[in-house]
Image (cartoon, rainbow, N blue to C red):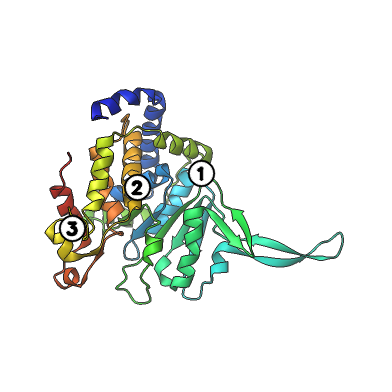
């Protein structure tokens, strides 16, 4: 199927719904801009994560409004918000919940009752997730992938709209643990926050040290978000665009015959097939939220860095020569042909 064929099949997509979603996305950006100064790329990619139904990992030093952004997302989309502060003594049951003994007021008998943990929400902020040991980090795995919790042999489903936005400090900082690869792979995007420009920092200082406080209002409901996610998945994508996504991911693997020499030299292992899935899903979300009727090459390239940066493991040679994952991804985007 050619790109032209994909465009013709896009006629089946409700055009009005796409236009409304694009307008809704801009309204969300405007509301978030009232409290988040700058950070336009992080805002854009956070919204793409929500519309695609995924999870996001946000990395950056303290004080860059990571927590404020995620809390504000819960407000503008009117989702049930829950925050988990990850600490070295946090236990898995502190996240998922636990069984407790409760006395029945009518019979006087004791019964076992499940007390849900903070993970039972629509939008979960896993704050400083890499400040807790790997055992507790792994407790998030089932919730993120299966969207359920198992306690005492019983399984409890999580809300239908369920997103984990985790923040982590750079691993060079004291008291941090490397996030297990299996858990990192569950995150659709890895987003990096950067220091604001001087002009943006002046606005931050002016806005946060005065007597007034910015107020944001909901733009969407949880039910409307679910409808938007279904719309995103209905966006057509051509075979050629899918092949480009798969080809781009395959070139990150040193053992792949098509991998360039610098990949074999600097990468220990490359991205999993989940990366190809998220490239296409991210491109669909990008298309739907910008008023396009089908996913395209531009969408794949727009989300490539966010999808790949936490799925590529550089080897010792790369670290010794200070070759970053971002550099390798940028080079792949330049070298891998679109067709």
Q: Are marks 3 and 1 in contact (CB under 8 Å)?
A: no
Left or right of 119 in this view: 282? left
Left or right of 325 in this view: 165? right
Marks 1/2: CA distance? 25 Å
Q: Say which mark, if any, is on residue 139.
A: none
The one nearer the camera, 260 or 201, is 260
User: Percent from the top left, x then y, of residue 303?
Assistant: 28, 47
Marks 3/2: CA distance? 19 Å
The residue wearing badge 2 is 278
Residue 113 appears in which quarter of the rendering?
bottom right
Q: What element carries label 1?
A: loop
Q: How many labels does the image show?
A: 3
Marks 3/1: CA distance? 38 Å
The vertical placement of 216 against 266, above or below, is: above
Q: What element carries label 2?
A: helix
Residue 197 appears in which quarter of the rendering?
bottom left
Please report whichever mark, 1 or 2, sits nearer to the chain's N-terminal start. Answer: 1
Q: Residue at x 56, y 62 (%)?
A: 96
Q: Which residue is drawn at 24% across and 36% down?
A: 240
User: Percent from the top left, x then y, of residue 61?
Assistant: 32, 65
Mark 1 packing: few (<14 Cα in 10 Å), some, or many (20+)? some
The residue wearing badge 1 is 78
Residue 32 appears in which quarter of the rendering?
top left
Q: Which corner quadrant holds the N terminus?
A: top left
The residue wearing badge 3 is 328
């Amino acid at each position: 199927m050619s790109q032209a064929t994909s465009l013709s099949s896009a006629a089946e997509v409700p055009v009005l719904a796409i236009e409304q979603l694009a307008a809704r996305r801009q309204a969300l950006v405007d509301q978030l801009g009232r409290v988040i100064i700058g950070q336009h790329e992080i805002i854009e990619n956070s919204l793409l994560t929500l519309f695609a139904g995924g999870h996001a990992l946000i990395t950056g030093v303290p004080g860059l409004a990571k927590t404020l952004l995620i809390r504000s997302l819960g407000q503008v989309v009117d989702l049930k918000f829950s925050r988990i502060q990850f600490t070295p003594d946090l236990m898995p049951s502190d996240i998922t919940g636990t069984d407790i003994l409760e006395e029945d007021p009518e019979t006087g008998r004791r019964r076992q009752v499940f007390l849900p943990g903070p993970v039972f929400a629509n939008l979960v902020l896993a704050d400083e997730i890499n400040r807790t040991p790997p055992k507790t980090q792994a407790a998030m795995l089932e919730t993120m992938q299966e969207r359920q919790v198992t306690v005492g042999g019983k399984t409890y489903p999580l809300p239908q709209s369920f997103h984990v936005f985790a923040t982590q400090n750079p691993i060079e900082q004291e008291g941090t643990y490397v996030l297990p690869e299996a858990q990192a792979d569950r995150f659709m995007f890895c987003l990096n926050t950067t220091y604001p420009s001087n002009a943006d920092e002046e606005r931050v200082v002016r806005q946060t040290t005065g007597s007034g406080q910015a107020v944001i209002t909901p733009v969407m409901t949880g039910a409307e978000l679910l409808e938007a996610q279904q719309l995103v998945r209905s966006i057509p994508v051509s075979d050629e665009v899918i092949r480009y996504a798969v080809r781009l991911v395959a070139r990150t693997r040193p053992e792949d015959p098509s991998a360039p020499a610098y990949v074999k030299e600097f990468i220990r292992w490359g991205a999993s097939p989940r990366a190809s899935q998220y490239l296409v899903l991210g491109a669909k979300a990008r298309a739907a939220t910008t008023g396009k009727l089908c996913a395209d090459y531009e969408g794949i390239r727009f989300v490539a860095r966010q999808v790949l940066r936490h799925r590529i493991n550089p080897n010792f040679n790369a670290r010794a020569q200070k070759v970053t994952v971002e550099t390798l991804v940028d080079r792949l985007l330049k070298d891998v042909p679109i067709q």
